């Protein structure tokens, strides 16, 4: 009899306790809060010294790019006031590039297989964990 009373009391306590959200729901909420926090905002590309609007991009070279071609593209970005964040040598680079120069890189790049991607980190918090 004592066992039944204990079991009923335990069952009543479990039923009366508030339900907890699933782990997936909690993780999703945490991710949203992290992305929206001030510490995790992506940097604003801003403008270069001439006032040209910059874009946050990843430039991907074709597989067999020559060093001269990579140097030409990277040099154009740097001399135009662009800010190269990462240089991956034969793969490409990520940078804040002035709009006009980006159009030139895209046009020239289309002839040799260069791909220009908008930086895909917009959904990844800028808290040191971002892979890009």
Image: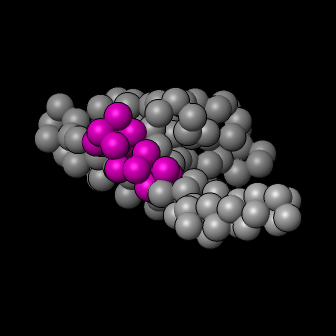
Considering every residue shown, the one lying at the far front of the view is: 1
Measuring from the top left, give residue 87's x and y in whole percent.
58, 30
Q: Is residue 9 left or right of residue 48?
A: right
Q: Residue at x 57, y 34 (%)?
A: 129
Measuring from the top left, give residue 21's x and y in whole percent.
57, 63
Q: Nearer the viewer, residue 6 or 108?
A: 6
Q: Residue at x 85, y 59 (%)?
A: 3
Q: Is residue 8 above or below residue 40?
A: below
Instruction: Give the residues in magenta.
Output: 30-45
Measuring from the top left, give residue 107's x and y in whole percent.
46, 61
Quadrant showing the N terminus: bottom right
Q: Is residue 10 visible?
A: yes
Q: Residue at x 23, y 41 (%)?
A: 46
Q: Is residue 43 left or right of residue 74?
A: left
Q: Residue at x 64, y 67 (%)?
A: 12
Q: Nearer the viewer, residue 106 or 53?
A: 53
Considering every residue shown, the one lying at the far left of the view is: 51
In the rendered picture of this protein, how many numbered marks are placed on residues? 0
Quadrant showing the C terminus: top right
Q: Is residue 121 above or below residue 130?
A: below
Per the picture, the main secondary structure of the magenta-coloured stretch is: helix
Measuring from the top left, give residue 77's x and y in whole percent.
40, 37
Q: Is residue 95 visible?
A: no
Q: Nearer the viewer, residue 77 or 58?
A: 58
Quick check: is 33 in the magenta stretch? yes
Quick check: is 36 in the magenta stretch? yes
């Amino acid at each position: 009899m004592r066992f039944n009373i204990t079991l009923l009391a335990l069952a009543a306590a479990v039923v009366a306790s508030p339900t907890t959200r699933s782990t997936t729901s909690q993780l999703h909420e945490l991710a949203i809060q992290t992305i929206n926090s001030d510490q995790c905002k992506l940097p604003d590309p801003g403008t270069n010294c001439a006032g040209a609007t910059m874009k946050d991009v990843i430039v991907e070279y074709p597989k067999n790019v020559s060093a001269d071609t990579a140097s030409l593209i990277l040099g154009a970005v740097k001399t135009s006031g662009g800010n190269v964040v990462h240089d991956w040598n034969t793969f490409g680079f990520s940078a804040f590039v002035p709009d006009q120069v980006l159009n030139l890189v895209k046009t020239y790049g289309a002839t040799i297989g260069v791909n220009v991607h908008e930086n895909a980190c917009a959904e990844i918090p800028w808290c040191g964990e971002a892979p890009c």
